[in-house]
């Protein structure tokens, strides 16, 4: 919401009001870390681009795959709040190694880490040079579930939610298997909603 370069990163689809972050993947579904999940009945607060506050109730959740959980909101999120696409699945994502990702933490901050490894189920990061520019962070307890994004054109593509500390690592949302399990969980909670994907 602040003026400056960071305003180019639309975080209106991330509920940062608690340490257990929740990220929109449809207008009614969020993803969270399965080991650090909000309980049904919890309030989720999203903030629009101009600071307006939107409240929704988490009415149900279920584990989708590994450390990926999906939650169902009581109402759809209106247009103007960001729903993040996932990478279009492909056989080999080695071309993403070395790319810079926007990594978030529990204090609603953005950092920039380098993709170190990506495989069928997992993405891990490394720090670039935090001593030089101060844009890296050692992730700690409480950062779990916070999302990481790669930039594609003018869009932010959700690639990972944190499972571990250090530079960060977690489930890779470009995985065909993870997307299939996630879509099945989404449909099981409320039918008629589909994941959106974007090529990286």
Image: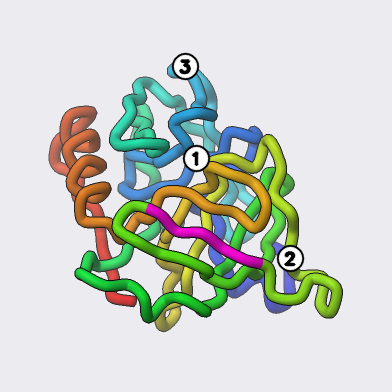
Apparent side of residue 191 relative to residue 1 in the rendered image (left or right) = left
Residue range corresponding to the magenta coloring = 122-126
Residue hosting label 2: 136
Q: Are marks 3 and 2 in contact (CB under 8 Å)?
A: no
Residue at (34, 39) in percent of width and height: 29
Q: Nearer the viewer, residue 41 or 118?
A: 118
Colour mode of the rendering: rainbow
Q: Nearer the viewer, residue 3 or 63?
A: 63
Horizontal and vertical percent position of residue 110:
67, 62
Secondary structure at badge 2 equals loop
Q: Is residue 64 above or below residue 122?
A: above
Horizontal and vertical percent position of residue 154:
44, 79
Secondary structure at badge 3 equals loop
Q: CA distance from mark 2 to mark 1?
A: 22 Å
Residue hosting label 3: 41
Principal secondary structure, stretch drawn in magenta? strand
Apparent side of residue 123 relative to residue 191 in the rendered image (left or right) = right
Task: Judge depth for marks 3 and 1 and give the one in front.
Answer: 1
Q: CA distance from mark 3 to mark 2?
A: 34 Å
Q: On the rendered image, what quadrant is the N terminus found in? A: bottom right
Residue at (31, 48) in percent of width and height: 26
Q: Nearer the viewer, residue 135 or 197?
A: 135
Residue at (69, 49) in percent of width and height: 139
Q: Which mark is residue 22?
A: 1
Q: Which mark is residue 72?
A: none
Farthest residue, direction left? 192
Q: Are marks 3 and 1 in contact (CB under 8 Å)?
A: no
User: Residue 7 lies in what quarter of the image?
Assistant: bottom right
Badge 3 density bin: few <14, some 14–19, many ≥20, Cα 10 Å: few
Secondary structure at badge 1 equals strand
């Amino acid at each position: 919401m602040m003026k400056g370069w960071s305003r180019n990163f639309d975080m209106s689809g991330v509920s940062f009001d608690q340490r257990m972050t929740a990220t929109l993947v449809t207008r009614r579904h969020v993803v969270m870390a399965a080991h650090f999940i909000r309980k049904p009945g919890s309030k989720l607060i999203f903030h629009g681009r101009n600071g307006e506050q939107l409240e929704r109730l988490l009415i149900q959740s279920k584990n989708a795959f590994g450390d990926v959980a999906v939650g169902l909101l009581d109402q759809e999120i209106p247009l103007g709040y960001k729903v993040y696409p996932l990478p279009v699945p492909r056989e080999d994502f080695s071309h993403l190694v070395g790319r810079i990702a926007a990594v978030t933490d529990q204090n609603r901050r953005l950092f920039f880490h380098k993709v170190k490894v990506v495989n069928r189920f997992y993405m891990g990061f490394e720090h670039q040079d935090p001593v030089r520019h101060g844009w890296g962070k050692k992730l700690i307890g409480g950062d779990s579930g916070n999302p990481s994004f790669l930039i594609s054109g003018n869009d932010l593509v959700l690639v990972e939610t944190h499972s571990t500390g250090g530079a960060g690592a977690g489930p890779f949302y470009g995985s065909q298997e993870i997307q299939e399990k996630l879509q099945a969980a989404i449909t099981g909670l409320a039918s008629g909603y589909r994941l959106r994907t974007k090529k990286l």
